[in-house]
Amino acid sequence: MRIAGFRKLSLLDYPEKLCATVFTPGCNFRCPFCHNASLVREQKPGVRFQDELDEEEVLSFLEKRAGLLDGVCVTGGEPLLWPDLEEFISRVKALGFPVKLDTNGSFPERLEALLDRGLVDYVAMDIKNSLPNYRRTIGVDCFDASRIERSVNLLREGKAEYEFRTTLARELHDAESIAEIGRWLDGSPVYSLQAFCGDGDLLGDGLSAFSKEETEAFKELVRGNFGCVHIRGI
């Protein structure tokens, strides 16, 4: 599997676990608030990223850290783009690590296969916006939002721990869209509101963040829909 980056130690990427984080390249979305632009842009066939790592090198490192790290997070980009992700995660699990997957939820068939095989222990799925606003938020005109709904329903079956999360940008979200998300995902255990950050390797421009007070108001708006609502990045 192609690995475009590797963080050997993270306290943030897997809730309540000390983990290593694997970054995969490529994404089928073009969300303007994405802060991993260099990972998600299309790459020429056969051309490696400058810092691309060999899968065996990463697995060798993880084998040496068995018992020292609490888990492994696989993120991107969009990891489920890669058909060999399942085999890679199988090898990580064989080393004894719980695995967290970050996904945009657009590949429900591959997500379902991982869940059915018990290969992921925690899934963080990005909810880009309310369903009527999905296409303009992800930067893709021809997209079937029912695939997102299917992934949501798969997670709600409870085969792994999960959370939903939304990155908030003033130009894309408002109180109505957040309230719609709350009604859509009502009864889910965890929802995270993430503040847009205008620094770094962004895919788009022209976006701005909400204030702390505005973000707190969004939290209050959906508090009753979820077991727990977090704010991150403020």
Image (tube, helix red, strand yellow):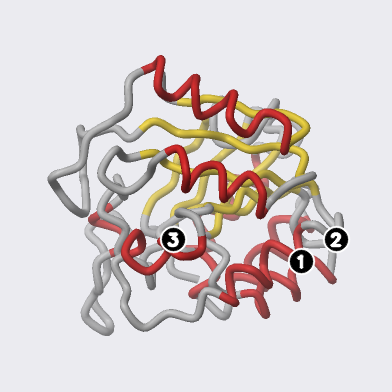
Dividing the picture into quadrants, the one containing residue 70 is top right
For the residue carrying disc 2, how many other residues have a C-alpha within 10 Å: few (<14), some (14-19), or many (20+)?
A: few
Q: Residue at x 69, y 56 (%)?
A: 92
Q: Residue at x 39, y 41 (%)?
A: 174
Expressed as whole percent of the image width and height from the top left, the position of residue 203 reads 21, 54
Residue most extreme to the top: 213
Q: Is residue 114 above or below residue 24?
A: below
Q: How far separated are the C-alphas under marks 2 and 1? A: 5 Å
Which element carries disc 3, helix, strand or loop? loop
For the image shown, how many numbered marks are present on the structure? 3
- 176, 140: nearer the viewer: 176
Q: How far separated are the C-alphas under marks 2 and 3? A: 26 Å
Horizontal side of residue 95 vs 110, given as left or right:
right
Q: Residue at x 58, y 49 (%)?
A: 181
Disc number at residue 24? 3
Expressed as whole percent of the image width and height from the top left, the position of residue 125 reads 59, 53
Q: Which residue is mark 1?
A: 154
Q: Amino acid at mark 2?
A: Glu
Horizontal side of residue 177 vs 60, given as left or right:
left
- 142, 17: nearer the viewer: 142
Which element carries disc 2, helix, strand or loop? loop
For the residue carrying disc 1, how many other residues have a C-alpha within 10 Å: few (<14), some (14-19), or many (20+)?
A: some
Q: Given this view, does label 1 or label 3 mark the residue nearer the observer?
A: 1
